[in-house]
Amino acid sequence: MKNCMFQSLALALLVLICLPLGAQTLERKTLTWEQKKIDIGAVLEEKGPVQAEFFAVNAHQDSIFITDVITDCGCTTVDFSKDTLMNEGIASIKVQFDPDHRGGEFSKVIIIRTNQDIYGDTLYLEGINMPIPENIEMAYPHRIGNLGFKLSAINMGNVFTNEPKIKYVEVHNFGSTEVSLEKLQAGIPAYLQVSLEPENLQPSQRGLLILSYDGQSKNDLGYFDERIQLGLNDDQKLDLRVMSVVYEYFSPVPKSMESIVPKLEISSAEIDLKDISANSKVSRTVTFTNSGKETLHIRKVSTNCNCVQTELENNILEPGESTDLKFTFDPKGRKGIDHKHISVFSNDPLNPVRTIVVRSTVK
């Protein structure tokens, strides 16, 4: 009898050991987060710690309570709800970031474990750390009036049409009076919004000029180098150079749709004109074809030099249709090896921007 019981127990253990790994995996009952990532923007070291708060709800019938919170940096501390959350109960996670002397963009990881989820949810606190410069004069060498900047121009970088791009620019007031922005700014385009933090920048104080660039409102694509003028208090003007590259945003294309969406094919993306004379214009033709199954729209054709002029026969191509792009290069005043770029913007979501390189040796 004992031998039979022993054999049964051994068999049961063997069955458990041989169970597939998936069958042994614990069921996860996670909290539903309002957001898992918070961007706190630019953090000036002199302002001290910055706080952000995450919220979550228990959407399960089982009660949940937080058992452990782990951060990846001593500069990040957390205070959280320790109460048991019944169904529809709300949890709060308060995260504090203490800026230090390490500047630049950061992404802090916070892992939240509960009694119903031993693996844990991952939250992210992101921003830009701006430490206090050791030498103010050297840190802000470019002056516009009484304001000091790190660089002579503001580079917005890549701006997409799905959401405004935010740029934080450090400024230092080297003057003897406070600086503020006029409430109405007639010298900036509608797609740009500018604010100053703090609103009143005191003498010898550092602050942030915050630019919001709306690519959708810009209603144009490509590289832009613009001048804007901000009105300051006491009728002062602040002239700024703003650079940007605006791209149309496309959602990721599923594999099943890659052969269906509009697709721009270019007969030659690299053209070598070889040896040409500086006294003669040169023209060539490139053929565009829509190899997709949806209508192709060529949004814009631009060049990196006024010496290259383009003519496009048709900017709307149905599936299988083709059109020609004629370009003319005027090498007057140039000499030696030369490279020019022609950028083609379209609604091809896989390759929305194509570049044609035109090489030559001008004699």
Image (cartoon, rainbow, N blue to C red):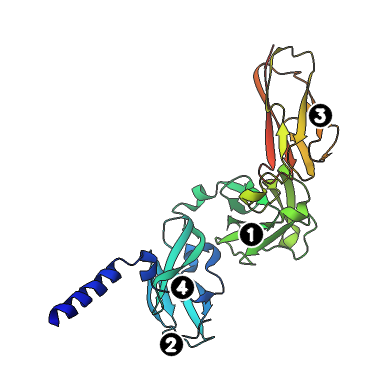
Is label 1 or label 4 in front? 4
Residue bearing the label numbered 1? 210
The amino acid sitting under disc 1 is: Ile
Residue density around tag 2, few if under 14, some if 14–19, many if 20 or more, within 10 Å: some
Q: Quadrant of residue 359?
A: top right
- Which one is in front, 261 or 181? 261
Instruction: Work out how far the residue at label 3 is from the one at label 1, CA to CA, in angstroms.
Output: 43 Å
- Please report whichever mark, 2 or 3, sits nearer to the chain's N-terminal start: 2
Labelled disc at residue 324: 3
Q: Quadrant of residue 234?
A: bottom right
Is label 3 or label 1 in front? 3
Relative to 65, say whether 253 is above or below: above
Residue bearing the label numbered 2? 84
- Please report whichever mark, 2 or 1, sits nearer to the chain's N-terminal start: 2
Rendered residue at 19%/75% (across/down): 7
Is label 2 or label 1 in front? 2
The amino acid sitting under disc 2 is: Thr
Residue density around tag 3, few if under 14, some if 14–19, many if 20 or more, within 10 Å: some
Q: Work out which residue is located at the far right of the displayed protein and give it.
A: 313
Residue density around tag 4, few if under 14, some if 14–19, many if 20 or more, within 10 Å: many
Local SS, label 2 = loop
Instruction: For the residues labelled 3 and 4, say whether their Cβ atoms are less than 8 Å apart.
Output: no
Local SS, label 1 = strand
Residue bearing the label numbered 4? 95
Instruction: For the residues labelled 3 and 1, say whether their Cβ atoms are less than 8 Å apart.
Output: no
Assign the C terminus to one quadrant of the image: top right
Image coordinates of residue 266 in percent, x first then y, are: 72, 31
Image coordinates of residue 195 in percent, x first then y, are: 67, 62
Is label 3 or label 4 in front? 3
